[in-house]
Image (tube, rainbow, N blue to C red):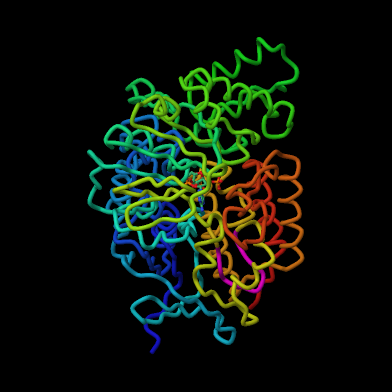
Amino acid sequence: MTNKIFDVVVVGAGFAGISAVHKLKKQGLKTIVFEAGGGVGGTWYFNKYPGARCDTHSMEYSYQFSEELQQDWEWSEKYATQPEILRYLDHTVDRFNLRENIRLNTRVEKLIWKQDDSQWEVSISTGELFLTDYVVMATGCLSKPNLPNIRGIDTFSGEIYHTSRWPEKKPDFASKNVGIIGTGSSGIQCIPLIAKEANHLIVYQRTPNYSVPARNEVLSEDFVKDIKSRYQLFREDNYKQGFGLNLPLNDISALDVSEEERTEAFERQWQKGGLGFLTSFNDILFNMESNVHAQNFIRNKIKTIVKNPLVAKKLMPNTPVACKRLCVDTDYYETFNLPNVELVDIKMNPIDFIKSKSVVLGNTEHKLDTLIIATGFDAMTGALTNIEIIGKDGESIKDKWKTGPSAYLGIAISGFPNFFMITGPGSPSVLSNMVPSIEQHVNWISDCIKFLKNKNFVSIEAELNAQHSWMEKVNKISDQTIYPHCQSWYLGTNIKGKKQAFTAYLGVPPYIDECREVVDSGYKGFYLSK
Ligand code: NA7
């Protein structure tokens, strides 16, 4: 039996879902959010591993929809920790009375478009059914865990944790022999902290990653006061920057300066810390020769920091910088100087199998009490294809995307009317500051629903041709960059059998212009039905 009828069903209560329900509710729309987790926060609810923190400045990685909220909230550090981010999201939900619209511990399992009624039927994990005019997928780009397919992993009888499904009760590493598989951002953030506690820590590294120091610090009163005195302007200026972040670009090629000047520029950013390293020059992401200079700089840093030259060599990546997402760390490379930390190159010496209490590589057996899996996510599309979403022609998104994800503006999909994605494939998403990008999408979607209702349209659907042209454009932009030049979750190569495709639109300002133009032209590239 079908239960209630909603105007909008939002899937997921992370940054995107919370922002969406706030906006849509304010617009007078009957809105509900279904969230699988036991609390709000999305990826920030589940990723509770030690050292989990944002690598975007907290004053920017926050909502701007309420001037009062951004004035009142006090971030304590330059890079907020996971618990602080969760406190912020809980505060936001309570402050704006959103909890009554959020159903926790509830997974959306199926969505079916009912053409005759121009509505979606929503099935949730309790077996209940709902009808809704619109669906907003706020399922996140990094939410479906990627589990390694290593023989015997399910027979490991010690403690085993995936970084993105960290338990509520903090695991105790003291006097334990711990192993960790994976050296992406999650691994790089938790390794230094676990190393401090564990008796022995073995890091199983398949591919080394570049990492730059965070140089995290407590936010000074003066800094906070300054931003807050011009918060709106600060946000507007950030939307004009390539990544939507306050990272002023040194607008000169790395090839147009002397070696000394180049090293100085990289060193300045290294000392400053964070992702600004990528803006040391204007062509690190576009010109391989410039990128090589950035690579050499970081490799030299690794050589200087890590005392054992063999270990340093193993830690040196040979891929382009930022081709895999650049990591931001606190004492990552330094950790490999500790006597209780061991680095194992599993590309050279693969893990054969895992058994009850150990990891076996050839003739070597590592006895472990705890195994941490830091192998990342089925990024960009995993959370969407995980749900059975059946569109107009009876086909699911999962089936449609077997040949690669395709969407218009990263917001809509042909064949799926009244279905919106927040930071979906084909939008800047992970190549931008996620929170402002989320808010830009929420505003676009809520304005679109307002338009449809005012003009008595019952449905909106992306045109297939517009969608194809859009994805071509996204690819054309990425082809001019270093991104297609290594294996990464940006391309989906970390998931076996997944069709390789680059699905982020590089460039926040032109993207925002394109979204605006679509609206100004009366929703160019969409079918509107009465
Ligand atoms: P990432 O960045 O995808 O890193 C996953 C790591 O796990 C990476 O080092 C992988 O090596 C490694 N990996 C993945 N599968 C395996 C298997 N089967 N065996 C061994 N090693 C494996 O995920 P994170 O969670 O660290 O970070 C994701 C994003 O979240 C991050 O960029 C931030 O934006 C937040 P590989 O490189 O594939 O050889």
In the rendered view, would you say 188 is above or below 21?
A: above
- Is residue 146 in view from this perspective? no
Could you say which quadrant of the image residue 197 lies in? top left
**299 or 7, nearer to the observer:** 299
Question: What residue sits 69% from the left and 27% below the top?
Answer: 292
Magenta span dominant secondary structure: loop
Residue at the bottom extreme, as displayed: 1
**180 or 265, nearer to the observer:** 180
Judge from the rendering whether residue 261 lies leftward or rightward of residue 74; answer left or right: right
Judge from the rendering whether residue 225 lies leftward or rightward of residue 288; answer left or right: left
Question: What residue sits 75% from the left and 17% below the top?
Answer: 256
Q: Position of residue 102 (x, y in %)?
A: 33, 64
Q: Quadrant of the C terminus?
A: bottom right
Q: Position of residue 366 (x, y in %)?
A: 38, 45
Q: Position of residue 402 (x, y in %)?
A: 65, 68
Highlighted range, magenta: 411-420
Question: What residue sits 48% from the left and 58% below the top?
Answer: 150
In the rendered view, would you say 17 is above or below 272?
A: below
- For residue 415: magenta? yes
- For residue 352: magenta? no
Q: Quadrant of the N terminus?
A: bottom left
In the rendered view, would you say 28 is above or below 493?
A: below
Count the labels in the image. 0
Q: Position of residue 495 (x, y in %)?
A: 57, 58
Could you say which quadrant of the image residue 10 lies in? bottom left
Judge from the rendering whether residue 107 lies leftward or rightward of residue 308; answer left or right: left
**333 or 466, nearer to the observer:** 333
**377 or 177, nearer to the observer:** 177
Residue at the front extreme, as displayed: 363
- Is residue 283 in view from this perspective? yes
